[in-house]
């Protein structure tokens, strides 16, 4: 009974510590308000959407000013700064998108009555079906005229053309939802609207496809790679770094990455010499690539590597990994389509295994197997599972989940990369081949910073990025191409995503060293990180070191870039 009461007191005090923060309800309300509005205003590319969210963020900036910051606890002050930063960031991104919208909004200047139909549908107002049929018919004619006019007025670049097409696709989606709401339930609507809707829907599809290609082809910078992205420029990069509380310029980050790159290359040569290939690290890397397992054996390999990494970590008592977390992670096989943009396995709740399927060409099969060999996989299974992404997801649901709103790749990817650095320094690799596998990914993260920033600054083309990954890192060409495509030609990666791995890892490593100097153990540090949930590492540092948190905190922590 005494043991039970003691456990109950610990549990209750733990619960109180979680829910004592004055900002929890404020943050949850912000998140709920935003969700409610996004659920209502579903046409993301419309004046109504941009105007409503501009008002929303403005109202929340006023609400924050009414909070007595000085009366907050340190946790509360941290959350205040995080929420203010999030609102400022989302306002900035909204303004950028709205500016791009206004530049091409004339493509939809015929559609006021169509938008009114969509808006009235939200409250179920019965439309005048006969008049609405005429509205749809007139809109179709207006689109035909717009196409004729725009055929002789190309957009200056594909960015504007894509935005214009997105506006029409958004309208098309909204009309479909509104039409479906009434169709079959309102006999008069069904009789009048079936043909006009089908005809206008097809015309909108034609219009959007036309707009998407209606730009000066001289502006298209296809360097032969077939990868067309959108460099954001130095000004936007710096603004995004400010939102992540990173006090370094893009040029400084590139310079740091180049120093780390050189360190990795020197270590790769050492591993090559251990393997008997002398300074020919590429030959050693070829040997490592050819250690791939037979088809069908990759899941078993992943499980064995997972067991090794968890045993290594628990033997040294580095972090608490709950038994339920170890019980509930899973595996899935990555689809061939997804492997085109992500040639290596990924993780989260499940580890998604990238390996060849029968339908791939012989060459693609070999590239996939070589790129996912056991030694390359050696440092990345724990990156994706424990103590990396799976543990992060597991703990985020159980510790201060309201902070999920402050998601950042510098915390998510940086934490997983930090473990690669930390385990290397604890002699995790057992063979020179495993060393080469760990170093391959370490140098890859350095390369990501270099090629992604140089691309975003407009200094490199996608083909130059691919060449770097093949010639300087040692990737298979198809894997390098997929990596660059994933970085620039999909919505998966924002501008800073690729540099967040190594930069975030260096932040965590610098914070670890600061706390160890103050008497913390590694386990205390690691467990505490998992209990605070995600946020920029600079704010986490203020919390863990119990530092004063200014109301208008800006990026100032010059974290060490030395991982040795």
Image (cartoon, rainbow, N blue to C red):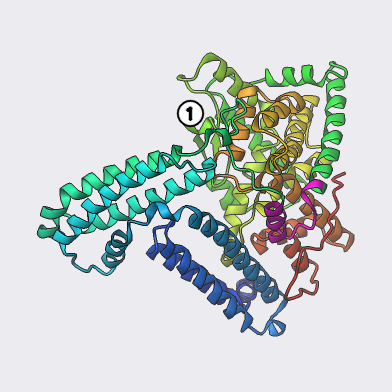
Viewer-nearest residue: 217 or 342: 217
Q: Position of residue 178 (x, y in %)?
A: 26, 58
Q: 503 left or right of 47?
A: right
Left or right: 421 in relation to 125 = right
Q: What residue span does the magenta drawing correspond to? A: 235-251
Along the line of sight, the residue nearer the viewer: 407 or 224:
224
The one nearer the camera, 234 or 37, is: 234
- Where 476 falls versus 93 (above or below)? above
- x, y percent for residue 460: 71, 35
Q: Position of residue 200 (x, y in %)?
A: 25, 47
The residue indicated by pointer 1 is 336
Residue 275 is situated, as x and y percent measured from the top left of the image, at 83, 19
Residue 460 on the magenta span = no
Assign the C terminus to one quadrant of the image. Answer: top right
Can residue 320 be seen from the camera position used here? no
Q: Quadrant of residue 405?
A: bottom right
């Amino acid at each position: 009974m005494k043991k039970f009461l003691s456990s109950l007191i610990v549990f209750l005090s733990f619960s109180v510590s979680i829910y004592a923060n004055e900002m929890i309800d404020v943050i949850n309300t912000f998140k709920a308000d935003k969700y409610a509005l996004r659920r209502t205003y579903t046409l993301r590319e419309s004046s109504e959407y941009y105007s409503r969210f501009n008002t929303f963020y403005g109202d929340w900036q006023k609400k924050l000013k009414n909070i007595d910051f000085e009366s907050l606890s340190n946790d509360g002050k941290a959350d205040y700064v995080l929420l203010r930063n999030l609102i400022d960031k989302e306002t900035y991104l909204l303004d950028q998108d709205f500016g791009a919208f206004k530049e091409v909004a004339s493509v939809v200047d015929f559609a006021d009555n169509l938008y009114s139909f969509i808006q009235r549908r939200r409250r179920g107002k019965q439309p005048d079906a006969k008049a609405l049929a005429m509205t749809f018919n007139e809109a179709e004619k207006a689109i035909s005229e717009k196409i004729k006019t725009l055929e002789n007025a190309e957009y200056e670049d594909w960015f504007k053309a894509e935005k214009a097409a997105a506006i029409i696709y958004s309208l098309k989606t909204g009309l479909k939802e509104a039409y479906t709401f009434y169709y079959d339930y309102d006999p008069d609507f069904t009789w009048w609207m079936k043909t006009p809707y089908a005809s206008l829907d097809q015309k909108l599809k034609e219009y959007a496809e036309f707009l998407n290609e209606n730009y000066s082809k001289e502006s298209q910078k296809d360097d032969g790679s077939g990868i067309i992205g959108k460099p954001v420029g130095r000004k936007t990069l710096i603004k995004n770094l400010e939102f992540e509380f990173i006090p370094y310029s893009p040029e400084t980050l590139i310079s740091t990455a180049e120093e780390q790159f050189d360190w990795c290359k020197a270590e790769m040569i050492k591993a090559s010499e251990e393997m008997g290939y002398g300074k020919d690290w590429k030959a050693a890397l070829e040997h490592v690539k050819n250690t791939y397992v037979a088809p069908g054996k990759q899941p078993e390999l992943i499980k064995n590597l997972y067991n090794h990494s968890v045993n290594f970590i628990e033997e040294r008592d580095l972090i608490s990994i709950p038994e339920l977390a170890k019980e509930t992670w899973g595996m899935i096989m990555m689809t061939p389509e997804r492997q085109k943009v992500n040639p290596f396995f990924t993780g989260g709740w499940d580890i998604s295994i990238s390996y060849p399927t029968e339908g791939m060409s012989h060459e693609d099969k070999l590239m996939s197997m070589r790129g996912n060999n056991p030694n390359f996989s050696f440092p990345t299974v724990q990156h994706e599972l424990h103590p990396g992404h799976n543990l992060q997801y597991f703990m985020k649901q159980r510790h201060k989940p309201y902070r999920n709103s402050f998601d950042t790749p510098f915390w998510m990817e940086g934490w997983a990369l930090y473990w690669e650095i930390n385990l290397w320094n604890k002699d995790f690799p057992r063979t020179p081949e495993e060393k080469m596998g760990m170093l391959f990914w370490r140098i890859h993260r350095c390369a990501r910073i270099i090629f992604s920033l140089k691309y975003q600054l407009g200094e490199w083309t996608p083909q130059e990025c691919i060449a770097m990954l093949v010639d300087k890192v040692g990737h298979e060409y198809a894997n390098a191409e997929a990596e660059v495509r994933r970085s620039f030609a999909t919505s998966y990666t924002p501008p800073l995503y690729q540099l967040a791995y190594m930069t975030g890892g260096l932040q965590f490593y610098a914070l670890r060293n600061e706390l160890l100097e103050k008497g913390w153990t590694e386990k205390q540090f690691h467990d505490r990180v998992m209990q605070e949930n995600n946020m920029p590492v600079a704010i986490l540092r203020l919390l863990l070191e119990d530092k004063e948190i200014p109301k208008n905190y800006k990026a100032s922590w010059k974290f060490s870039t030395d991982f040795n």
